[in-house]
Image: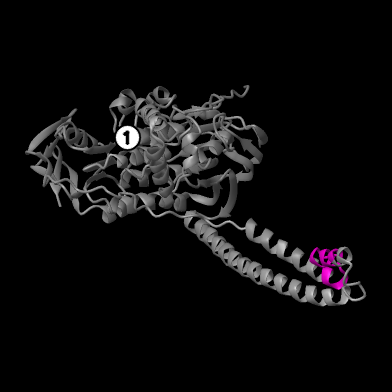
Amino acid sequence: MPRVQHRVRKRYSKPYILNRLPPPHDLLQNRGNMQLNLTNIEYAYPSAADPALRGVTATLPQGWTGLVGNNGGGKTTLALIACGILQPDAGTVTPSLFCTYCAQSAEEPPSNVKDFAVAYDSLAVRLRCGLAIEDDWPWRYDTLSGGQQKRLQVACALWADPDILAVDEPTNHVDAVTKRAIAAALSKFDGIGLLVSHDRELLDALCMQCLFVANGAAVMRPGGYSQASAQAALERASTIHARDVARKEKVRMESEVQRRREEASRAAGKRSLRGIDKHDADARRKVRVAVMTGKDGKAGRLSSCMAGRLEGAKTRLAAMRTEKRYDADVWLDTEHSRRKVLFRIESCTIPMGDASLSVPALYIGSKDHVGLVGDNGSGKTTLVRRIVRNLPDATRLLYIPQEPDESQKREVLRTIRKLSAARLGRVLSIVAQLNSNPDRILEGDVVSPGEMRKLMLALGILESPELVIMDEPTNHLDLGSTGAIEHLLSTYPGALMLVSHDAALLGSATGVTWKIEATAGGYKLTVG
């Protein structure tokens, strides 16, 4: 069967993409030993100033390889190229294998979801049981929570049983129980797995090696994320030490060059000017030029030698690069609201399809930092939407939903392009402090989900919000960005509500917990 290629340039809306039809399950053969070879891969987006990938070479064996790096660093691009969905501008991907790509977004149903709905072979049954998928889920995909959609998306990808499976942020939107179920399901995949993730636990559990992608280049390191990042940290420490040594060497050699020039010039001047008539100004000037330019015997040789060593020291210093880090103190003039209470809701019951959410009397004070927790499908996002709809009109609100839709993304980019130079500079500075390259914001429409979240946050900060509400704020973010966001939110002076499964973030940035738990008749919220 011929291989069908898909060229994608700007966005990847499909959560599940096959590069050709899968073979029937009863015809599947033992894969044996496989590996995928990426050789000198180059790729640039049409609107980008710099290429996304430059000369990337890697060997991907059976088992899971983690693709890690900062947002917008080229991880997803490399995964799409490995799957044959994007064609590189240069380089090769060999051999040609049956591939499946499971995208970050779960908004659209997997392309094979209806086939999975009527499938009850052993693999389909095992996936339904392992991921706790109800039989009716494939028929009502649009009504599922983000975590439920993600489970079904992963199940459909695994059911295709590809040779190469690339999964992009599979644990976004999911609670701890679902995360463990997804990890267990992925661990049974016996093909070539590419895991694009910022989930440290998942990378450690699945991956035998990690490919670090940054600035268009890629470096492979052995082990899960913890082992691989420890190796990267040792390399950075070694680079920092070497750079410090090189800097000291450069300063010492500059001083030595200057001292030797002065000594050699004095000695050579005394020697070389003897015998020249003191009135012969032209001859005496030529001698001095020869001394200073290194053309006068021993003095010249000494100066030239030291100058060469100095240039070598400068070259070594310039070749060393260290990782840049940013502090996230960006709130500046933002203050908490003068109103003591920003929002109040009386006890009520909120309908949610076949279930309901029982809510006690709640309020949010001007300085309260609230964490909203609960299992997938328990009504967290429903409650947040109710709060947003009922806020007083005068409230300066920054609300960043779990997954902004396409119209919201386009509006953000339009707003960015209309900003004054001063306000644009402020936005780009905030984005830089959140561990992203601000130059990418000006390159066109290619903005990763993590970068879009940072852009929305940066734009919101400009308006000095009284209340910040973020639904799963660390979704799509790299580990460095997660730390920056955690610091930023923990220092926010106003009211804050975070819907998250990230215990570390909630522990750092919130002081009050609203917990939703299942009951016999639905769900109930308690304040702790």
Q: Which residues make up the magenta segment?
A: 285-300
Residue 144 in the image: x percent, y percent?
29, 30
Q: Is residue 206 magenta?
A: no
Residue 189 in sight in this render: no
Outermost residue, right direction? 275
The quadrant in which the N terminus is found is: top right
Residue 10 in sight in this render: yes
The residue where tag 1 is placed is: 146
Identify the amino acid type marked 1. Gly
Residue 251 located left or right of residue 472: right
Main SS, magenta residues: helix
Residue 37 in the image: x percent, y percent?
65, 41
The residue at 30%/39% (across/down) is: 460
The one nearer the camera, 392 or 232, is: 392
The one nearer the camera, 90 or 294, is: 294
Secondary structure under the numbered disc 1 in the rendered image: helix
Residue 99 located left or right of residue 290: left
Residue 44 in the image: x percent, y percent?
59, 34
Answer above or below: position of 297 versus 128.
Answer: below
Residue 156 in the image: x percent, y percent?
43, 31
The residue at 72%/61% (across/down) is: 311
* Mark 1 closeness class: few <14, some 14–19, many ≥20 residues within 10 Å: many
The one nearer the camera, 288 or 29, is: 288
Answer above or below: position of 370 versus 118.
Answer: below
Q: Is residue 296 magenta?
A: yes
The residue at 21%/42% (across/down) is: 467
